[in-house]
Image (cartoon, rainbow, N blue to C red):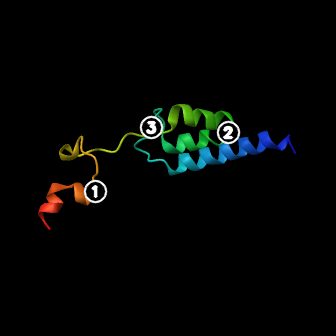
Amino acid sequence: MLRLVPAIAILAAWLYGMVDCAMADPDRIRGGLSKTAWFLITVLPVIGTTLWFVFGHPRHTAPPTSGGTRGRRPMAPDDDPDFLHGL
């Protein structure tokens, strides 16, 4: 049973890498290769998945913020003067 744990972990990482590659936005993929090429690379269980996560996986960026809300925290309605003024 203990010998199956590494095989199951490799299989899970391989499947996750293939699905992640298939679902990735083609415009955000790094590495200079197309999405199809990266998918074919991820077919290789250990090497392909590792290459995908190191070189091809899109970086996540922070969501854009609007200029008017910069530095403001959400507040409760009873703390918001604009809300209280409208009552």
Q: Amino acid at mark 3?
A: Arg
Residue 76: numbered disc:
1
Q: Pointer 3: residues within 10 angstroms few (<14), some, or many (20+)?
A: few
Graded by Cα atoms within 10 Å as few (under 14), some (14 to 19) or many (20 or more), the crowding at tag 1 reads: few
Helix, strand or loop status at disc 1: loop
Q: CA distance from mark 1 to mark 2?
A: 52 Å
Chain-order first, disc 2 or disc 3: 2
Residue 78 versus residue 7: which sits nearer the camera?
A: 78
Task: Please tell me whether mark 2 sits on a helix, a strand or a loop.
Answer: loop
66 vs 7, left or right, is: left
Q: Nearer the viewer, residue 12 or 66?
A: 66
Query: Residue 55: x, y in percent?
Result: 52, 31
Q: Identify which residue is drawn at 29% across, 44% down.
A: 64
- CB contact under 8 Å: marks 1 and 3: no
Going from N to C along the chain, the mark reached first, 1 or 2, is 2
Q: Nearer the viewer, mark 1 or mark 2?
A: 1
Please tell me which residue is depicted at 60% across the width and 38% down the height of the picture.
41
Residue 48 location, x and y as percent? 63, 36
Q: Which residue is mark 2?
A: 44
Q: Do the residues under discs 2 and 3 have CB atoms within 8 angstroms?
A: no
Which SS class for mark 3? loop
The residue that mark 3 highlights is 59
Task: Where is residue 57? Give x, y as percent.
Answer: 50, 38
The residue shown at (69%, 36%) is 46
Where the N terminus falls, by quadrant?
top right
Q: Answer with the quarter of the image where residue 71 lies.
A: top left
The amino acid at mark 1 is: Ala
